[in-house]
Amino acid sequence: LIDHLRSQKILSGPVSAPYWYLGMQSAVDAASLARNSEVALYNGGSNRCGYCSMPGKTCRTEFSMDSRFMTASDYQSLIDRGWRRSGTYMYKPDNRSTCCPNWTIRLFVPNFIMSKRQKKVLRQFQHYIKFGTRAELTSEPTPASPCTTDNSSEIAMISYLRCAVQQVLRDNLLPSDVPFSIKSSQKHLICNVSMVVMSHLKRHCIQVSQDLHQLGLQIAEALSRFDLHDMKTGIPIKVDSDSKGFVHFSAETDLVLPKIHPRKQQTGQRRTDSPSEPVVRFSTQIVPSRFTTEAFLLYQKYQVAVHHDPLSKLTEDQYTYFLCETPLAQEQSADPGVIFGSFHVEYRFNGTLVAVSVIDILPRCVSSVYFFYDPEFSFLSLGVYSALHEISLVPDSRLLPDLKYYYLGFYIQNCPKMLYKRQFSPSELLCPEHFTWHSIEACIPLLNLNKYVVFSHHLEHSVDRKSDDGNDSEDSSASVDDVKLLLSNQEYRFSDFKKQARIALLPKIQQFFDCVGPRLATKRLIIFDI
């Protein structure tokens, strides 16, 4: 992929591996890495499932913990036992009882072969970079036609503002499911929410103490506290109300400026104006996991337009905790060009941020954490392209012979949005009890019959790479008494506790021991809060 992008002048700058960094802090020294990874224990729990969203269905966590410091090798061992992280929060799904079991999935990169669909996405991306047009892939190259407008920018902005209005209605105990509209008018967007709410209240014989003008002012004042921004320029949005109760959204520049995209090319004509240099300047850069306003505004835009999240929940603190904070220290690997830790991969068109991959680079893998992008470029299938790009970040280094996997997070059999992960071949699923890896082609028929499967009970031949997975070196002599705890900066073992304290803490300590494994529980992790 890298060689192809370079030859086609699609990717500018150095692209040989995950070796380029901006503002990189020095990797931690050996003394820091010698310290134990520090965790605070939580109980398991349940919440509404975000995958099936079925009434009464819950997503259950077997165990969870928060970490304020963790080495890359310790986290690698955790994800090879079915764990994942969200910021500094780490959790292990309870696949036996959850409604949608989460299966750890990884790709063996040396054997990766792109599918027809992935090759098509790459060609579409290449076409857009070269010509600045949306490709219609036919057997014949075709020329561009005159430009037309694309209203995806306006749709994304209106979706963004609708979420804000609905949140204000809920906060003020007003009906939020009323069919209000937001329409474009010159340099403004106008919302009729006040009229629709007033009509709804009167129709249901609810006494209203305000007139339309007062209600519009109340809603506008509440919206102004949301710190709304133009989703294209980042310019603050001004919210006010007129005497008729209409809510107006405006900015210093045009609030809605639909992006110009050339029309799809007409078939049957050959392109004759192929540019010598790409029309769109595409670049990527790996930076340490960090907060930037530019990325935060892009994240807000993506979450509102794609996942329909309420704007009130998409705060700077929520974004920082979810995608910027990390317990992983930056560690220098055996290869001078590779640093372990948490990073953001920024994708830019002509210098403008259009997508961000959140990844962890670990001793045996590049692990995908999250990806968000500008919805205006959804026609490029950036989710698939970003996965291909992240796969290319797995270095072919003789100094790091174990770093040859790409972890795609969790695979969920009954979730249509997750089916694309099966297209990255050859992929493997993790056995939930014996932590062996099995070909996904062999696992799918079992998952079609049963929601929960112990793959090693049914599949005799697992993927023969256990020697580099680290879970075959557990200390069988270790016990829960050897678990380490940090109290008042003093290290203790669980066996040091008095009987009464041991009885009270034993259930949680035992579950911790079982979920992380004897080696991590007694040799590498230390509990600083329980």
Image (cartoon, helix red, strand yellow):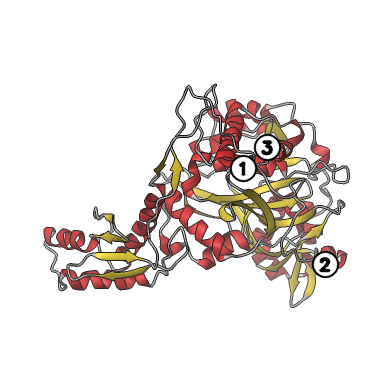
Which of discs 2 and 3 lies nearer the camera? The answer is 3
Dot 2 surroundings within 10 Å: few (below 14), some, or many (20 or more)? few
CA gap, disc 2 and disc 3: 43 Å
Could you say which is closer to the camera, residue 197 or residue 447?
A: 197
Q: Is residue 177 toward the left or the right of residue 35 in the image?
A: left
> Callout 3: helix, strand or loop?
loop
Which quadrant is home to the N terminus? top right
Tell me what residue is drawn at x 36 percent, y 70 percent: 238
The answer to which image quadrant residue 444 occupies is: top right
Q: Is residue 528 toward the left or the right of residue 129 in the image?
A: right
- Estimate the x, y position of residue 169 in percent, counting from the top left: 29, 64
1 or 3: tag closer to the N-terminus: 3
Dot 3 surroundings within 10 Å: few (below 14), some, or many (20 or more)? some
Q: Is residue 383 toward the left or the right of residue 337 in the image?
A: left
Question: Which residue corresponds to mark 2?
Answer: 32
CA gap, disc 1 and disc 3: 9 Å
Which amino acid type corresponds to the residue marked 1 in the rendered image? Pro
Position of residue 111 relative to residue 226, above or below, is: above
Question: Which residue corresponds to mark 3?
Answer: 8
